[in-house]
């Protein structure tokens, strides 16, 4: 059931990003909704699920823009694995922790992507603003979700004993 739900989230993110990506742009910077969804999937499902969903999402993006075929699949697989590594070991209840994980995932993806394209300048010109904007969108959506559902975001982890 979780795989089906995560598949729907990922397909929805791909559709939203491809159709409304331009409308969400702010000074020519667009949030990466696919990576936002991938971070959620990887943190909730672990390394294997993060890697598989990262590969599938990247592969679908590569089909859509095939000039660097395979690069999105590789970068998103690595990011999905890295973020999934935190499954069960990182307490993500604090909004700052979520923001740092999301920023690291998006910026890490962009560093990998632009390094393989041998485009060093775009790491700071495109990667950093995209990571900041995606982090703001992700944290904002997280806060809206918790406000709408009535759950609380705690700034500390529960002690195991």
Image: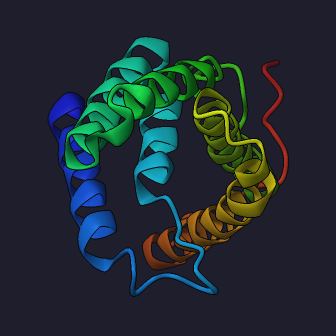
Q: Is residue 120 above or below residue 73?
A: below
Dividing the picture into quarters, in which one does residue 33 lie? bottom left
Name the foreground residue: 155 vs 57: 57
Label count reads 0
Quarter occupied by residue 117: top right
Q: Position of residue 8 (x, y in %)?
A: 18, 48
Q: Position of residue 157 (x, y in %)?
A: 80, 38
Residue at (51%, 82%) from the top-left corner?
Answer: 25
Q: Nearer the viewer, residue 128 or 153?
A: 128
153 sits left or right of 30 in the view: right
Tell me: residue 24, above or below residue 104.
below
Can I make out residue 45 in this image? no
- 91 relative to 74, above or below: below
Q: Which residue: 32% across, 30% down?
A: 69
- Left or right of residue 47: residue 101: right
**Which percent across, then down, holds residue 16?**
28, 68
- Residue 67 placement (x, y as % from top left): 33, 41
Q: Residue at x 21, y 29 (%)?
A: 3
Residue at far top of view? 48
The color scheme shown is rainbow
Image quadrant where residue 1 sits: top left
Q: Is residue 68 left or right of residue 159?
A: left
Specify whether 58 is left or right of 121: left
Q: Quadrant of the C terminus?
A: top right
Q: Which is more toward the observer, 90 or 119?
A: 119
- Residue 18 in sight: yes
């Amino acid at each position: 059931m979780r795989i089906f739900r995560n598949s729907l989230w990922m397909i929805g993110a791909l559709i939203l990003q491809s159709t409304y990506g331009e409308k969400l742009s702010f000074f020519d910077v667009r949030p990466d909704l696919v990576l936002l969804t991938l971070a959620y999937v990887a943190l909730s499902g672990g390394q294997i699920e993060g890697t598989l969903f990262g590969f599938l999402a990247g592969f679908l993006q590569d089909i859509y823009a095939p000039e660097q075929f395979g690069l999105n699949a590789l970068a998103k697989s690595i990011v999905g694995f890295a973020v999934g590594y935190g499954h069960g070991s990182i307490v993500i209840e604090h909004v700052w922790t979520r923001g740092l994980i999301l920023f690291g995932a998006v910026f890490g993806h962009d560093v990998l992507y632009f390094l393989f394209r041998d485009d060093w300048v775009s790491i700071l010109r495109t990667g950093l603003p995209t990571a900041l904007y995606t982090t703001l969108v992700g944290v904002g959506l997280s806060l809206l979700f918790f406000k709408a559902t009535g759950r609380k975001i705690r700034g500390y982890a529960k002690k195991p004993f």
